[in-house]
Amino acid sequence: MLFSSSPSSTHNWNIIMSNANRYTGLVDRYRDRLPVSATTRAISLGEGNTPLIKLENIPRLIGKNVEIYVKYEGLNPTGSFKDRGMTMAVTKAVEEGSKAIICASTGNTSAAAAAYAARAGIKAFVLIPEGKIAMGKMAQAMMYGAITMQIRGNFDDGMRLVKEIADKAPVTIVNSINPYRLQGQKTIAYEIVDELGRAPDYHCLPVGNAGNITAHWMGYTEAVANQPADQFEQVIYDAETDQFTGPKPEGLPTMVGYQAAGAAPFLRGAPVENPETVATAIRIGNPQSWNHAKAVVRDSQGWFDELTDAEILEAQRLLSMYEGVFVEPASAASIGGAIRDIKAGKIAEGSVIVCTVTGNGLKDPDTAIKQCSDAVMLSIDATLEQVRDSILSNM
Ligand code: F0G
C-alpha cells in the first residue's frame, strides 16, 4: 500500500540530518547572494553543482589550440538548467503564500515547474505547444502531476496567455519574466568562476527566450567583482536606463548567443512570426528578455549568430560520439556555434571557452534515434557464434 505506509521508526533521523557537508541545492549554497533570508525555506531537489567538463577530443579534431569546457546542465534533477531558476521561483512563491504556479513552455520549464510544485505541495499549470515538445518533457509534466494545457499555438502564444491570465486567477508566473528565475540561474556563473578561478574568455550558449544569457551575465559580473558579503550589490537589468546596475569589473567573458536559423529574431532584428526548428526548446519568435540580451551582447562585445537545423544536429552527434556528452538539440547550438567561430578565427586560439549545454539528450529520444539511421544496430540470433562474428567484423 504505497500511499498508506506509516513512517519507519527504525531510522535515526538525527544522525542523517546532522550531516553538514551534504549538498542541499543552490539556495542554501548561495544564500548570501540570493534574495532570500536566513530562514527562508528552500524548495530544492539538490539542483546546481553540475560538472564542468573539459573537452579532450573535439579541440584535437578541429586542430585548434583552445580550451573548451561544457557546463553539463542536463545533470540537474529534471535534466535542464531550468531547475536553477525554478528552485528560486518556487521557494519565493511558497514564501509569499502562493498555492499555484503557471508557465508557458517549450518543455523544460514545464518539467521543472511541475517537479518543484510537486516538491512544495502546490499546483502547477503548464501551457505547451501541442505536438511540439519532446517526449521526455511531456512524460515529466505528466509524472510530476502538472495540469497540462496543450495549446493549438506556439510558445509565444502561450507566453501571451500566461501574462494575461496572471491578474485574473490566483497563480504565480514562473517564466523568466519572474525576476527570481534569473536570480537562481545566475549561479551557473558562480560555479564556473569558482572552478576555473576566473571567468572564461568566451561564454557560448543557446538563446531562445533570452533569460539565460541575461542570468549568466548577472552572475559573471557578481562573481568576478567578488564583493564582500556585507557590501554585496546585486546586478540587475534596469529597463529605464537600458543598463545593468552594480559593479563593472574587468575580466568578464565575451558573451555569444546562438539561435536556430528558423527561430532567430536577434538575427532578423525583429520578432519571427512562425518560428520553426528541430531544436524545439528554442522554437521561440518573440523573446521576453529582448532588451536584456541585447545589452549583454553590447556590454560584453559579443555577438548573436544562427545555426541551421542540420548544423545543430551535427554538433549534437559530434559531442555525443567524440566526448560522451549527450545533450538535447537546442543545447548543441552552443557547441556547434563555438566550433564554427573557432574554426573561422572569430574566437582566437589560446582562448578559454565555456559552452552551456542546457538540457539532457534523454529529453528528446525521437530526434536522437531519427538521426542515427547509420548507427551500428545489429539484429542477431542469441548464439555465441553470432555475437563473436559481430565483434570480429566490427573491430
Ligand atoms: N536550451 C534549452 C534546453 C531550453 O529549454 C531553453 C529554453 C533554452 C536553451 C533557451 O534559454 O529561453 O533562457 O534563452 N527553454 C524554455 C522552456 C523556453 O520553456 O523550457 P532562454
Image (cartoon, rainbow, N blue to C red):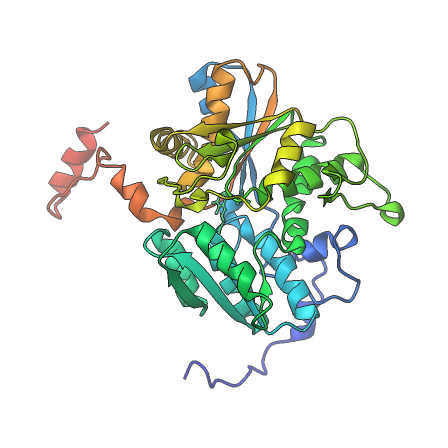
Q: Quadrant of the N terminus?
A: bottom left
| Residue 33 appears left or right of 11 | right
Say whether residue 173 is visible. yes
Q: Nearer the viewer, residue 52 or 124?
A: 124
- Residue 236: horizontal and vertical position, in percent? 73, 44
Task: Tell me which residue sits at (55%, 81%) in the image.
Answer: 8
Q: Position of residue 57 (x, y in %)?
A: 45, 24
Q: Quadrant of the C terminus?
A: top left
307 left or right of 234 in image: left
Residue 94 versus residue 282 in the image, above or below: below
Image-based side of 381 in relation to 166, left or right: left
Q: Is 77 located above or below residue 66 in the figure?
A: below
Residue placed furthest toward the right: 230
Which percent across, then down, holds residue 67? Answer: 57, 23
As displayed, is residue 133 above or below residue 227?
below
Look at 43% across and 32% down and name the residue there: 323
What residue is at 41 percent from the left and 55 percent from the top?
A: 137
Residue 194 vertical position relative to residue 62 in the rendered view, above or below: below
Where residue 41 sits, quadrant-wise, is: bottom right
Residue 43 visible in the picture: no
Taking depth in this image into account, of 200 and 174 the one nearest to the observer is: 174
